Image: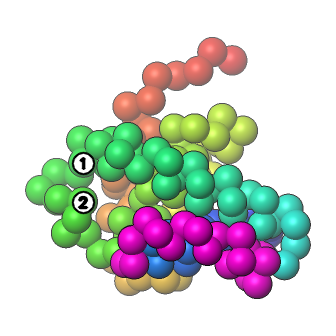
Amino acid sequence: MKKRTRSRELALQFLYQVDLLGADKMSDLTEFLREEGGDPETAQYARVLIEGTHDSVSEIDAEIQAVAQNWQIERMAVIDRNVLRIAAFELLHCDEIPPKVAINEGIELGKRFSTQNSGAFINGILDKIKNRIPAKDA
């Protein structure tokens, strides 16, 4: 498995816990990454995703809510909501990650950890978010 794919899995696992147990769980991040991270590069990118997503959650949720027709973010499945948050963070704040990669990784995480239908749902939301981002000059 690729390092960044594993980082996204770790981020999903940890942010799922934070979503269910509350922001106080963030204090366990270093221990979680020490136990689960393995490779230092994997753990480092997982930390970027976790902290970045957590710190930007209001902005990210607003972006998701703006494009999620007939869906309230708090009513989405916890896994789907956190996959969307991670991928949206990459779309909005990680210029080195091509949008197509962020979207495809999000779709695969949804399929792997949620339901088969999650892939299409996640794809639709992320594609709309991508289309809202101003094109960057090449």
The residue where tag 1 is placed is: 65
Frontmost residue, 116 versus 71: 71
Residue at mark 2 to residue at mark 1: CA–CA distance: 6 Å
Frontmost residue, 92 versus 102: 92
Q: Earlier in the sequence, mark 2 or mark 1?
A: 1
- Image colouring: rainbow
Q: Residue at x 46, y 22 (%)?
A: 134
80 relative to 77 in the view: left or right: right
Q: Which residues are magenta?
A: 19-37
Q: Position of residue 109 (x, y in %)?
A: 53, 72
When asked about the image quadrant of residue 30, the answer is: bottom right
37 relative to 64 in the view: left or right: right
If the image is split into quadrants, where does the C terminus sit?
top right
Q: Position of residue 115 (x, y in %)?
A: 38, 83
Q: Is residue 131 above or below residue 99?
A: above
Q: Position of residue 80 (x, y in %)?
A: 38, 70
Please name the predominant secondary structure of the magenta segment in the image.
helix
Q: Residue at x 38, y 40 (%)?
A: 59
Amino acid marked by disc 1: Gln
Residues marked 2 and 1 touching at CB (< 8 Å): yes
If the image is split into quadrants, where does the N terminus sit?
bottom right
Q: Is residue 3 above or below residue 89?
A: below
- The secondary structure type at the circle numbered 1 is helix
Amino acid marked by disc 2: Ile
When asked about the image quadrant of residue 73, the answer is: bottom left
- The secondary structure type at the circle numbered 2 is helix
Q: Position of residue 129 (x, y in %)?
A: 39, 41
Dot 2: few (<14), some (14–19), or many (≥20) neighbours within 10 Å?
Answer: some
The reply to whether residue 109 is in sight is no
The residue where tag 2 is placed is: 73
Dot 1: few (<14), some (14–19), or many (≥20) neighbours within 10 Å?
Answer: some
